[in-house]
Amino acid sequence: MRFYIWEHHGYDLDFEPYRKQEIDLPAVRCEHCGYTFYGAPSASDIPLDVPRALRKQLASLQTETPDALSPEIISMEAFRELSQQVRQIYNLPPTYPVMPSAYLGARFVRGAANPAWHAYGPDRYTGSLYVSRVFAERLRERAIRGVHLFPVYTPSGEQSSVLLAVVTGDGGIPKIDRGELVVCSACGRWEVRGRTRVRYQVDETQWDGSDFFRFRYSLLVVSERVVEVVNEFGSSLFPYTRWEPLDTVERASSDMPVDFGPYSFLQISGGGQAREEGT
């Protein structure tokens, strides 16, 4: 099985999605590693109406957070409690992501409610992924796993020709071909260190078998089965989407100098051993 990184490229200025209820889940700070999860991973919205009970609960967090945290940031423990409440309110399955800073509320669209593309996003501003109903139907026919689809409405409340896609697949933590993989034992966040460029590989012992999935909290990946469906339509109908083979894409480690260019002037080599944060 081959895997591909799914990325957004360019913008359709005639496509204007929005929310009438602009409510987000709070950001979270991990007390163990100190990392703050400010932005939700791509395609992890909860595009459902926000009931009064949940609005009240979120409002209370704005005034009852510890002094050490800003009003928009809560602790890991507090978020775990909140995520359980969110799951109960919406009756979400265990595989559905409830992530820090996730967008809540139904999605609407102005302007072109019948765009010519079959997929759009996740863009850098909203992190949301949209697909056409035609493409969605083909995904269903092919039994593509790891994506949950929701209607997107016109301003008058009618369903548009696009759907909002939420990625539910889990790829766990990837394997790496070099550098050092560091994983926080509390929040599960991972990063690669070693001042190097690294290629990721799917660890099939952690991957749940979905065709749409993320490595833990980041990087949207699809299986070759999704790319096969895309190719049935032709790339011209996906002008805002790029997919590159995962095993060919190099990414900089977290401690890479900002002036490290695409040429390698450091003689770097190494294994891919993981260690726990703080050890």
Image (cartoon, grey):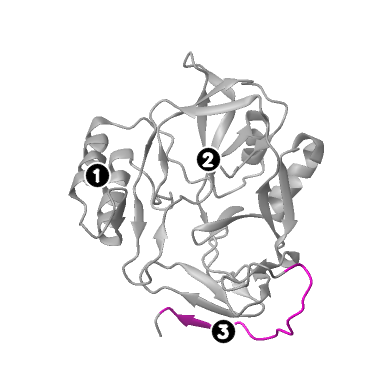
| Dot 2 or dot 1, earlier in sequence | 1
On the picture, is 116 further left or further right than 97? right
Q: Residue furthest top?
A: 156
Q: Nearer the viewer, residue 224 or 47?
A: 47
Q: Is residue 135 above or below residue 146?
A: above
Q: Is residue 234 visible?
A: no
Q: Nearer the viewer, residue 195 or 170?
A: 195
* Residues at circles 2 and 1 in contact by the CB criterion of under 8 Å: no
Which residue is at 74% across, 43% downward?
A: 230
Residue type at mark 2 is Thr
Alpha-carbon span between mark 2 and mark 1: 22 Å
* Percent coordinates x, y for residue 123 in the rendering: 60, 42
Question: How many tags in the picture?
Answer: 3
Q: Which residues are magenta?
A: 261-277
Q: Is residue 223 visible?
A: yes
Determine which residue is flagged by label 1: 62
Alpha-carbon span between mark 3 and mark 2: 34 Å
| Dot 1 or dot 3, earlier in sequence | 1
Determine which residue is flagged by label 3: 273
* Percent coordinates x, y for residue 33 in the rendering: 38, 71
- At mark 3, the secondary structure is loop
Determine which residue is flagged by label 2: 126
Residue type at mark 1 is Gln
On the picture, is 100 further left or further right than 8? left
Main SS class of the magenta portion in the image: loop
Query: Looking at the rendering, in which quadrant would you find the C terminus?
Result: bottom left
* Residue 273 picture quarter: bottom right
* Percent coordinates x, y for residue 201 in the rendering: 65, 69
Which residue is at 61% across, 82% downward?
A: 272
Q: Nearer the viewer, residue 159 or 91?
A: 159
